[in-house]
Image (spheres, rainbow, N blue to C red):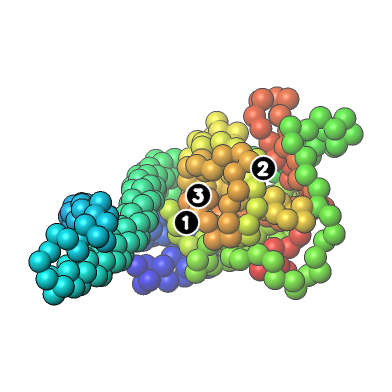
């Protein structure tokens, strides 16, 4: 898998040609094949762990039942002695020796009772620990099944992407470059249109949601963790070469683009609350009629008011509005939805963030708001 990841990184740094794109897609599919097999093996092992833990729990429960039966017998013995007075006990036996033996027997019962109580308590603690392990294993299985579904979906998505690119371009480099130009042009036109709408939204305050940060941390303050493991930076923040061509309607790139490979887990960069999410599963790259931009996205507000945006995810985030998430918690998976030319995660940090309804399409939109974004690299 690491070798495929390295090869993918090299391909992204090469000039964007049809040949390189097809090679990149083929490499990505091969990498996904290995990841799917790895995940399936992890699911198999997790199921075995669940079965073993369930067996341990059953055996522990049986042991607790046995201990309770022993306790019940010991308590019955104690009741017999409790019902006798000291005089009755003395008259019951012929010699003092027998009285002493019975007293010693009572002491041994007490010792046995303490031992059984201690053993029962230990068993109960073990049972509780095993139930925690079982719960964790079931959660892990649930996550692995979700990851497997995402990987298989990504695999099919890449195959579709390859077929579509070859169909649209008919294998010709010139037509591929025209395809890339169209995607860039569509994006620029969309952002220009939305920029005008956003100006009106700000004046009229006609927001669906609005969030503004308080004091802005100084650049160099590490407040965020990388949202993907082993991520490679594919586009920086600001007036990148791509932005200078007018790809963002004359504005700078309002975040960074990174990739760990399609279907890689996307994690919350810091603890916070889900404040907005959107669904745009269509892909401009393979469907010219699609008017999507961010694809599947989710936004998190953090203590202090900053909002982080995670977009182009393969599927809509399973997180719900208002849900609290911790740093490093998986909130989605890398994809290629929206207006993109390949799988990646777009990650933005907003000091002012708002959503609104597009009056033309009725879609929920995110403010591009480049002037109110920070360079994420200054805080990672």
User: In the rendered image, which quarter contains the N terminus?
Assistant: bottom left
Q: Earlier in the sequence, mark 2 or mark 3?
A: 2
Task: Confirm whether residue 159 shows in the render.
Answer: no
Label 1–label 3 contact, CB within 8 A: yes
Secondary structure of the residue carrying tag 2 is strand
Q: Secondary structure at mark 3?
A: strand
Image quadrant occupied by the C terminus: bottom right
Judged from the image, the secondary structure of the residue bearing numbered disc 1 is strand
* Residue underneath mark 2: 275
Mark 2 vs mark 3, CA separation in Å: 15 Å
Q: Residue furthest right?
A: 203
Report which residue position mark 1 lands on. Answer: 265
**Label drawn at residue 332:** 3
**Is tag 1's residue or tag 2's residue first in the polypeptide sequence?**
1
Gap in angstroms between the C-alphas marked 1 and 2: 20 Å
Mark 2, other Cα within 10 Å: few <14 / some 14–19 / many ≥20:
many
141, above or below 284, in the image = below
Instruction: Give percent across and percent down for residue 44.
Output: 23, 56
Q: First in sequence, mark 1 or 3: give its number.
A: 1
Name the residue rendered at 54%, 61% in the picture: 328
Image point (47%, 70%), residue name: 10
Q: Are marks 1 and 2 in contact (CB under 8 Å)?
A: no
Residue 61, position as x, y percentages in the image = 23, 53
Q: Nearer the viewer, mark 2 or mark 3?
A: 2
Binning the other alpha carbons within 10 Å of mark 3 as few (below 14), some (14 to 19) or many (20 upward) gives many
| Residue 255 location, quadrant | bottom right
Q: Is any part of residue 203 visible from this angle?
A: yes
* Residue shown at 77% from the left, 56% from the top: 304
Residue at 50% x, 42% y is 318
101 on left or right of 304: left
Quick one: 306 or 202, which is closer to the camera?
A: 306
Label 2 close to label 3 by CB (< 8 Å): no
């Amino acid at each position: 898998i690491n070798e495929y990841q390295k090869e993918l990184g090299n391909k992204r740094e090469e000039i964007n040609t049809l040949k390189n794109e097809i090679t990149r897609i083929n490499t990505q599919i091969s990498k996904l094949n290995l990841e799917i097999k790895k995940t399936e093996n992890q699911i198999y092992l997790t199921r075995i762990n669940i079965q073993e833990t369930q067996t341990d729990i059953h055996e522990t429960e049986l042991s607790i039942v046995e201990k309770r039966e022993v306790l019940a017998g010991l308590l019955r013995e104690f009741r017999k002695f409790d019902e006798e007075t000291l005089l009755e006990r003395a008259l019951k036996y012929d010699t003092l020796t027998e009285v002493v033996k019975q007293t010693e027997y009572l002491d041994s019962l007490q010792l046995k009772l303490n031992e059984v109580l201690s053993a029962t308590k230990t068993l109960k603690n073990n049972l509780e620990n095993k139930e925690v392990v079982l719960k964790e294993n079931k959660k892990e299985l649930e996550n692995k099944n979700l990851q497997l579904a995402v990987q298989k979906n990504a695999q099919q998505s890449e195959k579709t992407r390859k077929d579509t690119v070859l169909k649209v371009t008919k294998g010709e480099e010139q037509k591929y470059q025209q395809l890339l130009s169209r995607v860039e042009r569509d994006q620029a036109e969309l952002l220009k249109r939305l920029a005008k709408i956003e100006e009106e939204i700000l004046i009229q305050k006609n927001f669906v949601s609005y969030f503004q940060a308080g004091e802005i941390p100084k650049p160099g303050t590490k407040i965020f963790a990388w949202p993907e493991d082993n991520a490679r930076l594919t586009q920086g923040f600001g007036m990148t070469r791509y932005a200078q061509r007018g790809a963002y309607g004359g504005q700078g790139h309002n975040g960074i683009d990174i990739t760990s490979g399609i279907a890689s887990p996307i994690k919350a960069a810091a603890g916070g609350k889900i404040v907005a999410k959107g669904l745009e599963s269509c892909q401009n790259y393979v469907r010219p009629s699609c008017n999507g931009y961010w694809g599947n996205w989710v936004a998190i507000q953090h203590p202090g008011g900053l909002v982080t945006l995670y977009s182009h995810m393969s599927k809509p985030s399973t997180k719900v509005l208002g849900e609290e998430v911790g740093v490093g918690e998986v909130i989605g998976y890398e994809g290629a939805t929206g207006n993109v030319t390949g799988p990646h995660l777009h990650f933005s940090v907003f000091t002012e963030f708002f959503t609104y309804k597009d009056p033309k399409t009725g879609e929920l939109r995110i403010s591009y708001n480049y002037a109110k974004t920070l360079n994420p690299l200054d805080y990672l």
